[in-house]
Amino acid sequence: MKLLVLATEPVDADRLRGVLPGDDLDGAEVLVVSPAVNESAVAFWMSDSDEAIAEAESTAQQTAAALREGGAAQARATTGESEPLLALQDALATFDADRVVVFVRDEDAARYREDDVVGEAERRFGVPVTEVAG
């Protein structure tokens, strides 16, 4: 299975396994994408993205390492655009995922629902998308 994981905070293998049918993580090829999210609109407009990119890189690397240790055959990490749909679009242009799992922080949940990230991603990309809040 080829699995795309979108996460703004580190995720471990047990948490991911909890939303996958069966043991789909075992032997999976995983691409972890962590959006470079600015903490405020002011930071965005000031183009202060260095901190957001560094945090995204750290999150993606930690998650990929945890997934490799947890049974994924391959797990690589990358950063993505701050907008979840753009991050998914960019990743899916080069990674032909069978499934997408989007981990949403509580403070971002309203925005993800307002933008209908899961529904829009499924319509645009034709890949099953699971949202995990919390």
Image (cartoon, rainbow, N blue to C red):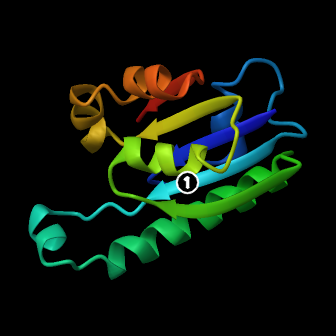
In which quadrant is the N terminus drawn? top right
Vertical position of residue 52 compared to residue 100: above or below: below
Q: Position of residue 86 (x, y in %)?
A: 39, 47
Residue positioned 20% across, 77% down in the render: 47
Residue positioned 18% across, 68% down in the render: 44
Relative depth, front residue between 45 and 110: 45
Q: Position of residue 23 (x, y in %)?
A: 83, 26
Q: Is residue 10 visible?
A: no
Relative depth, front residue between 14 and 80: 80
Q: Is residue 51 visible?
A: yes
Q: Is residue 10 left or right of residue 14?
A: left
Residue positioned 59% across, 33% down in the render: 100
**Label 1 secondary element:** strand
Q: Position of residue 106 (x, y in %)?
A: 31, 38
Identify which amino acid the numbered label 1 is placed on: Val
Residue positioned 23% across, 36% down in the render: 111
In which quadrant is the C terminus drawn? top left
Q: In the rendered image, which residue does mark 1 sit on?
A: 33
Q: Position of residue 98 (x, y in %)?
A: 71, 29
Vertical position of residue 22 compared to residue 28: above or below: above
Vertical position of residue 132 compared to residue 12: above or below: above
Query: How crowded is the residue under tag 1: few (<14 C-alpha within 10 Å), some, or many (20+)?
Result: many
Relative depth, front residue between 39 and 36: 36
